[in-house]
Structure formats: structure tokens, C-alpha cells
Image: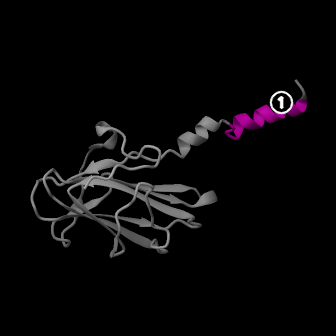
Amino acid sequence: MSGRRFLFLLSLLFLGGNPASAQVVNRPPEAQWLEPAKSGAAPLLFRRRFERPEGLIHAILHATGSGRLELSLNGTLLKAPGTHGLDLNPAVTNGVNVLQVTLTATNSTPRFALRLELNAGIHGHRWVVSDGSWETSGDGIRWQAAQASRAIGSDGPLFQQGVPRIER
């Protein structure tokens, strides 16, 4: 084996030249269903704080839910994400941002799942997903930790190939 070929193979080994491992690193975390502990007609609020990463290229939100679902970012009501998601890049500000979901029961148990992709190019990917890191409130004053009910995959894939299922 030539010296150059040996060095090339050695560099692949130590520098992570395996393309499969790169895909695993970029795989988004699993979103979970968030739903109220008790069913009722009153709206329930969920919120999650996140920071805008340096070098943000795009911020794409995918969301789905049952019941009436309203999304807001930093107090501004957002339109419902389409089949290709909702571009939040212009609305994500420097510093801390607050993503809020208002969930109201209709004919079924209200619940939602979402995934926000924050792509900062060479600075990396970050993900905000519905999980136990969210807070919930019935009145917007007293907030407590939200309880995730189960992974969305238990009902079948929702964010398959970047196309969410939107239920109204």
C-alpha cells in the first residue's frame, strides 16, 4: 500500500469520513405529542423559549395537531404551516425567542406535535421539538412543565420527508 493511500485511509478513519455517521448526527430529535392533562373546552397554552443561532440561514416550522391550533412567535400570530412548512427566518429575532401554541378542544382530544429546524450552515443545525422541555398554562400566568404523552411515531410518521400531516 502506498504511503499516500495509507494516509488517506487513516484520515478517513480519524476525521469521521463515514457518510453514514454524518447523517446520524444531522438526524432531528423525535417530536412528542403534547396534550392537556385534563380535557376541557378552555384553551391551553404551551410555550418554549429558544435562542437564534449565529449564522441562521433558515428556520422552518412543521406542526400538526387535533383541535384548534394557533401558533405564535414572540407574540405575533403565525399562519398555519403548509405542506412544506412555514419559513420563520424573518420572524426569529436575535436573542431569546418564544414559540407559543394555543390549543383548544373541538371534537377530539386536543394535542399537537411540532418541529422547528434552525439551520445555521457551518455553525450547525439545532432543533426545537415538542417534548417535555415545554411549559404549559391554563391562564397564561402560572406556568408548569408540560408532560409529553408519547412519541409521534407511535401513531405513524408525521414529518416524513419534510411533509407534515395537518389535521384541523
Pointer 1 residue: 6
- Residue 91 point in image, percent of width and height: 45, 73
Left or right of 119? Residue 30 is left
**What residue lies at 34% left-to-right and 49% top-to-bottom?**
165
Q: Residue furthest left?
A: 40
Q: Residue furthest right?
A: 2
- Residue 39 point in image, percent of width and height: 11, 54
Q: In the picture, residue 145 is in which quadrant?
A: bottom left
Q: Magenta-highlighted stretch: main secondary structure?
A: helix
Left or right of 6? Residue 22 is left
Q: Can you say which quadrant of the picture contains the C terminus?
A: bottom left
Task: Name the colouring of the figure.
Answer: one colour
**What residue lies at 57% left-to-right and 67% top-to-bottom?**
54
**What residue lies at 10% left-to-right and 61% top-to-bottom?**
41
Front residue of 60 and 30: 60
- Residue 13 point in image, percent of width and height: 71, 34
From which residue to which does the magenta span run?
3-17
Front residue of 83 and 63: 83
Q: Residue furthest top?
A: 1
The amino acid beneath tag 1 is Phe
